[in-house]
Image: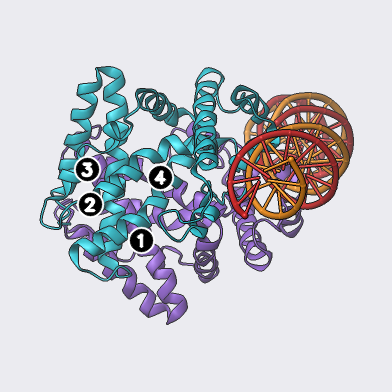
Chain colours: A purple, B cyan, C orange, D red
DNA sequence: CAGTTTTTGGCACTCACTGTCATGATGGCA
DNA sequence: TGCCATCATGACAGTGAGTGCCAAAAACTG
């Protein structure tokens, strides 16, 4: 039940020490990433239809067209199968934050965060369904929390770099935790409003939450 | 792997609709609470000695002097066994916050939070050992995150009451999430400093983190 | 003390997950 | 194009976490 998440191709990626001088070919890796995402989609579909408890790992594997053994190689638990969908928003948020010039206000990099992060419509709709499952599914909620917790480290470094503070210091860590929590709430608001009203309302809710949170944070 | 945590005696407690007119006698409940805590202590000890993965539920049960079947009735997973220790600080923090007059600054209710929450020395030292396990034990970290997530709801209501805001509104929720995250970081700092230096240093670190965080929050 | 409810334990069972090995697909290179 | 090294996949068997069910024991009520 340990949850040591192994990013696909991490070993290969770190072996390639340049842009791609002699690393693993991207074909295989891209296929693996596709498989990961396909599993995630099927898992969300099955979880939404029958609930997490009533969905076995074997069913997910069958739906994704792979053997159970392979499923457990891709993900360490059936709940973790949804991680690729949950993390996509935070990853782009971190990337945009890193690319944001130090002078600009924080929310510029974030206000388009989660919603537009999922450029592909299928990802976005799956993410929407998934977040709506969270209140009723403790196991998935745990993944959601873990994903955000993993993002904290990244945010801490980005914030430390932006504010010129010590990355191991207390202040950037506190700010990262707060920002991270705000993004979680914003994403939940986004999902709720998107489902209640429409996509525009969801995006607006997300932006409002982020703005509300960041203006008091001074990052 | 569902994590529906059932507080001990909840059913009995809600049946007793007065201070205790005809509810369950407190003896049984107290004994159950003691059993819960005893299990938690043994679990932490075993986890610290051999690691979570190498500790079986059966071992925890044997150490606590109960049958495995009973252990699984008390806790839904072996990791959850440590929850009573992890939640003690947040519970007292919430209680003190509730009792804090509306005018007083927030940190007055919190600065003595986690450390002194564990009045009993054994609880405090077990909690210390436990928090130090978190970085290496993803399963326990997940419990830590879940405990904090559960506390969010409580904090949201307390904050809404203090600030006169709508408890379902965005602002109190954001503030609760931020406060909660700050308390988590503060507790981790407390554990680190307590272990590196001494108890006083730990308490001081906790207070510093809480102060740092609350002064920007306007609760 | 007798009757009822609650808690515990024992047993059997499911299924999430893992170690191991054989097989097949893929990419590198002559 | 064909051979070799590498790695992904699958089949199989095994462990152990967690659950349902029923009986025994304990606690509470009168």
Crowd tier of the residue under label 3, counting other residues whose Cα lies within 10 Å: few below 14, some 14–19, many 20 or above: many
Crowd tier of the residue under label 1, counting other residues whose Cα lies within 10 Å: few below 14, some 14–19, many 20 or above: many
Whether marks 1 and 2 lie on the same chain: no
Q: Residue at x 41, y 64 (%)?
A: A188
Numbered tag placed on residue B92 in the rendering = none
- Residue underneath mark 4: A149
Q: CA distance from mark 4 to mark 1?
A: 14 Å
- Residue underneath mark 2: B99
Give the label, 3 or 1, closer to the camera: 3
Nearer to the camera, A193 or B3: B3
- Residue underneath mark 1: A185
Q: Residue at x 22, y 69 (%)?
A: B165
- Where is B150 relative to A3, above or below? below
Give coordinates of residue A218: x percent, y percent. Answer: 15, 52
Q: Secondary structure at mark 1?
A: helix
- Residue underneath mark 3: B110
Nearer to the camera, B75 or A91: B75
Q: Secondary structure at mark 3?
A: helix
């Amino acid at each position: 039940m340990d949850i040591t998440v192994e990013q696909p191709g991490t070993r290969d990626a770190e072996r390639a020490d340049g842009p791609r001088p002699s690393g693993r070919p991207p074909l295989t890796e891209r296929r693996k990433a596709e498989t990961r995402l396909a599993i995630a989609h099927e898992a969300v579909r099955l979880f939404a239809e029958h609930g997490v408890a009533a969905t076995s790992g074997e069913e997910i594997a069958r739906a994704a067209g792979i053997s159970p053994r392979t499923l457990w190689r891709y993900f360490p638990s059936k709940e973790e199968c949804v991680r690729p969908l949950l993390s996509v928003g935070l990853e782009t948020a971190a990337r945009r934050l890193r690319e944001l010039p130090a002078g600009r206000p924080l929310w510029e990099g974030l206000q388009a965060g989660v919603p537009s992060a999922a450029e592909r419509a299928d990802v976005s709709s799956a993410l929407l369904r998934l977040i709506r499952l969270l209140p009723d599914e403790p196991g998935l909620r745990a993944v959601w929390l873990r994903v955000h917790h993993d993002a904290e480290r990244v945010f801490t470094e980005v914030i430390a770099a932006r504010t010129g503070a010590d990355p191991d210091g207390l202040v950037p860590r506190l700010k990262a935790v707060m920002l991270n929590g705000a993004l979680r709430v914003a994403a939940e608001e986004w999902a709720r409003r998107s489902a209640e009203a429409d996509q525009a309302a969801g995006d607006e809710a997300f932006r409002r939450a982020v703005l509300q949170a960041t203006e008091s944070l001074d990052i």
